[in-house]
Structure formats: C-alpha cells, structure tokens
Amino acid sequence: MTLLLCALLLCVPFVGASLPSLNDTNTRTLDASECPSCNTRTLWDILLSCGLTIFACTWSAVHTNIPGRDEGRATITSRRLFIMIMALIAPELMITWATRQFFSARATAKEFNDEFAVRLGQFRDRQAIWESKLAAALLGDIPNSSGNSGWTVTHGFFAWMGGFMLYVDGEPRGTLDPDELLVFVRSGSVDMPVISQVEIEDRGKGDGLSKGIALLQLAWFFVQLVARYAQNLPITLLEIDTLAAAALTCVAYSLWWKKPKDVRCPYIVYWKAENQPCLLTYEDADLYRVGLGRVNSFIYPFISLTGIRVFISPRAARFRRVPSLGGYGEHHDKIVLLVGCFSGMVFGAIHCLGWNYLFQIHTEHMLWRAASLGIACAPVLLFLDVGLILWVGYGNMSDLHNIIALFSAIIIAFIYFVARVTLIVLMILSLRSLPLGVYDTVAWTTFIPHL
C-alpha cells in the first residue's frame, strides 16, 4: 500500500510539468466537419484506417478454443467478437492469456513425448530388432523429449484448446484436458492418440495469406505514423490508441503462431476400459461462478485471462467444451506475470506519445497525461504486489499481509480500469475538434532522393 501511495504522489509533478498556460491563448483546431478541400485526408479516412488496422489485427490474432458440437455459427461468431472486444480494451491481458497457453502447450508436448519415449522403449525391449525398426518407422513422427521430432507445440495447443473428444460406447462423452488424456493413456483406458502436425493444421482455417495481410496492414499503418512524425504532422489520439492496441495484439499473435486457428472438429479418442470414466473436468459447471451471478459474470473474463482461475461456465459444461477464456495450466507463473505487466507498461508508454497533444481544454490535457502514466505505472506496482505473493507463497504469509496484498491489488486494478476508461473517453472527445495539420497528408515525394 505504501508503494502505491508513493507512486501516485510521484505522478503528480510529471502531470503538471511542462504544461503551457492555455487560459490566455486559444488552441487552433479544426472541427470534424471543416476539413479543407485542398487536403485529401478526411475524418472518415482516419476512422477507416484505424478501423481496418484494428479489425485486421484482432480478427487474425484471436485464436479461439474449439466450440461445442451443437453450437451454432451465430454463437461461435459472437464469442469471437467478445474476445476481440477484450483485446481492444485490455490487450495486455490477451498477451498474458497467450503466454499461459504457450507455456502450457510446451509443457504438454514434453510430457507426451516422454510418454511416447517410454512406450517405444518398452516395445523395443519386447520385440526383435527387425520388429523394433518397423515400429520406429511407423512411429517415426512420435519422438522422445531429448531432441527428436515428436509432439510439437502445435500438438500441445491442440490438446489444451479441446482437440481430443472422448467417446464411450460410440457416443461423445466430453472434451478431455491434457492431464486427463495422459492419465487415461497411462492406465490403458484409451490408446495413445497418433496425429501429425500436418493433420492438426489441416483441421484449422488459418493460412499464411490472412496472416500476411494483417501484418502488412499494421506495417503500412506504422509507416504512415512514422512519416507524419518525420514531417511534423500531428497524429490523432485515435491513431495512438490504435497503434498501442495493434502492437500488443501482434505480440499475442506471435505467441499463438503455432496454435491451430478456427478448428471445429476434435480428434476422437475411444474408451476401451470396462469401467465407465469418472466425471470429466469440463462436465462440471463452476458453482462458484453460478453463485455470484451477474457480478462475477462481469469480472470473470479478467480473472480467467490473468490466469487467477479458469471458470467453467454452465454453457461450457452443457456442451462439454473448453471454456472460452480457458485452455491453459499452471506453468511459469512468475514469467507470465512479468510478461503481462511489461505489456501493460508498454501499452501506457505508447499512449504517452500524446503527451503534447493540443487539447482544447486544459483539464483534458492533464487527464490524458495522468491516465497514460497511470496505465504505465500500475503494472509495475501490480508486479511488485503479486510477485511478492508468488515469491513468498500465499500460504506462508500472515492473514494481515494477505489482506493487504489483496486490497492493494484491487486498488491497482481499479486505478488501471479508471485510467483506461479515461483514455477512451478523451480519445472520443478529441474527434470533435482536431488540431491544424491533422488532415494534411504525407508528402511521400520528400522521402525520394533527388538532385
């Protein structure tokens, strides 16, 4: 709590520093409807450029989990749009989610490679040399964990996103998480699934063309902003926010690069034991979420994305699928926390590019600076607070320390939420009147060398 108060006090001098007096001068601006005819750039051009960049990045970057068997296209599309909105509001949480899934996929691939290595070794001990060579040829794409090819990160992603469906007596029972699948394989209840990376990728709908278009759109948007800066042309707050959201979304995109995209059909695993399987993970709805009702329905996306807890909603349990914002295990918590907090700092730092933006009202100018600093500083405080809990251990701390740490985390999250809402409101209000030069286009010929 002391660190939180000190950080807030330190932000005050920076917010008030270098602010020109706007009481005795009028900032020259242009209304959105008064774009000069000599300029080829209009407000609609700005909105269209930002909108296309955001849509291209978020639509291509978001890799959803496998939906339920009987879920319609409208439900799947609405779920995807919801995740896209989350990526716009809090892109650093998307990076945290993607990082957790990446580490979980790597760990799962290693566990199954170890299991493949053990089984292949046992087989070789029982069979003759020529039979073991035949087995190696048949299982050539299933490696051990010592460096040969085998289950890849793509296999791990596929397992965590709900890629293996258990069938009992010819009927679908439910989706298996990687831990359940590994337990059933070791007990002999199911056969080891043999599926290549090419087969998994063939089930997805992602391709290099869509990825390339999204990256080209972001690159072109970035080049335009750099060119405007080089020619001393002003940049709108909307473009700054678009740059921040798109840049962080592409980081999540890189973490999901090996994750299959838009897979609809899981791989079927048949139950061969005599006894019926016990209750599966994704068959039981989370009663904690059901009990809290609407309040928890509002905060559960943020809790799931940060990795605090994965909620199994009644809808996910009804369709026996992986939760929309789940699909990960507990791996490398400290690294995930560091990556998420650093992403939040970068997000706030990019918004500080509007530090000297020409606002009409002095209060709006101060609010933008304060909100940008708040978003940049809040992740640092959250890293110190939660990092202390992870380092010491929640069970090793006294009740008083646990309460203080939890209360501090809630306050930090509230400050971050208020700062983010403030930036969005100021960004929208700035479109009423834009500074002179916003509608001027880049003179690209000045960048061409000539005599």
Image (cartoon, rainbow, N blue to C red):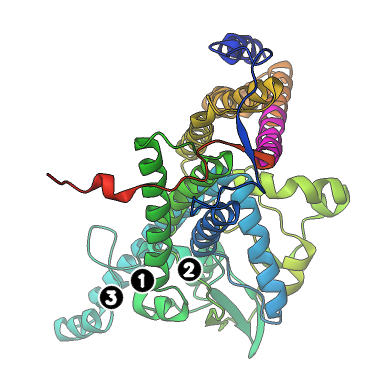
Callout 3 amino acid = Asp
Q: Residue at x 35, y 67 (%)?
A: 151
Find numbered disc 2 in the image and state the secondary structure of the residue it sits on.
helix
**Label 2: which residue?**
158
Callout 1 amino acid = Gly
In the image, is residue 93 above or below residue 257? above
Find numbered disc 1 in the image and state the secondary structure of the residue it sits on.
helix
CB contact under 8 Å: marks 2 and 3 = no
Find numbered disc 3 in the image and state the secondary structure of the residue it sits on.
loop
Nearer-the-camera pick, 68 or 237: 237
Corner quadrant of residue 427: top right
- Tag in front: 3 or 1: 1
On the image, the x and y values in percent for residue 128 come to 18, 83
**Label 3: which residue?**
141
Which range is magenta?
414-430
Q: Residues within 10 Å of mark 3 (few under 14, many from 20)?
A: some
Corner quadrant of residue 127: bottom left
Q: Report the disc number at residue 208.
A: 1
On the image, the x and y values in percent for residue 362 come to 68, 20
Callout 2 amino acid = Phe
- Tag in front: 2 or 3: 2
Nearer-the-camera pick, 257 or 210: 210
